[in-house]
Amino acid sequence: RGGGGGGGGAGASRSAARCAAGSGPRWWTSLPDICSISGFPVRLLPYPPFKLHLPTEGARKLAVRLIDGSFLVLTVLSSWRFEAFGVPLSMSEIEALDTYMKRCKLGPYRLSRALELANLGTVASRQELEALRSRAARRLDVLRHVQQVRLERGEPEADEWSMPNMQM
């Protein structure tokens, strides 16, 4: 199982870059997919979706799901559950999500940094981790609200909207 469109390791970072670059400008805006994590239409995302590869029952190939990568990262940080669809995230997926968040300029939310802070175990690292998780929870609330408002007002074209102050 690979993350962000690749098989893992260094390839995961290249795959995340391909995801962010896509196969043309705003390639995702014509897709009918709904993000299975946020419930928001992929075509309305103001940034490219993340390509998450998941195992499929009885198949050798991995299924690709287009998801709101920012929503996933913020959810993981807020809940401290490093999984998607009940499957643990691998280190290559975590690295791919970090690359995706940076490339798409979606804020300072990096899963590998959170894990690093948790493993350090110092007072300062615990405080920094708690601050990161708190900011992620607030950002997730804002993202949920903005997406709900967009859905209620009739799903305008993705070009008409961008996330306010992604850094929070």
Image (spheres, rainbow, N blue to C red):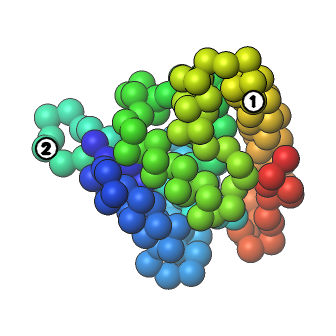
Tell me the SS state at disc 1. helix
- The residue pinned by badge 1 equals 128
Residue at 46% from the left image edge and 33% from the top image edge: 84
Which image quarter holds the N terminus? Answer: top left
Measured in 3D between alpha carbons, the distance from the residue under mark 2 to the one under mark 1, in whole angstroms, is: 41 Å
Secondary structure found at label 2: loop
Residue placed at 52% from the left, 67% from the top? 20
Residue 5 visible to an observer of this rendering: no
Q: Amino acid at mark 1?
A: Glu
Q: Nearer the viewer, mark 2 or mark 1?
A: 1
**Residue at 74 percent of width and 74 percent of height:** 159
Where residue 121 sits: x, y (%)?
61, 18
Depth check: 71 or 96 in front?
A: 96
Q: Which residue is disc 2 drawn over?
A: 60
Q: Residues within 10 Å of mark 1 (few under 14, many from 20)?
A: some
Quick one: label 2 or label 1, which is nearer the N terminus?
Answer: 2
| Residue 124 placement (x, y as % from top left) | 75, 24
**Quick one: 64 or 77, which is closer to the camera?**
77
Residue 158, image quadrant: bottom right
**Residue 38 in the figure: left or right of residue 137:** left
Question: Exactly how many numbered labels are in the figure?
Answer: 2
Residue at 59%, 38% in the rendered image = 113
- Give amino acid for label 2: Arg
> Which is nearer the eye, 15 or 63?
15
* Residue 151 spot, x, y in % from top left: 76, 50
From the viewer's perspective, tell me whether residue 34 is left or right of residue 136: left
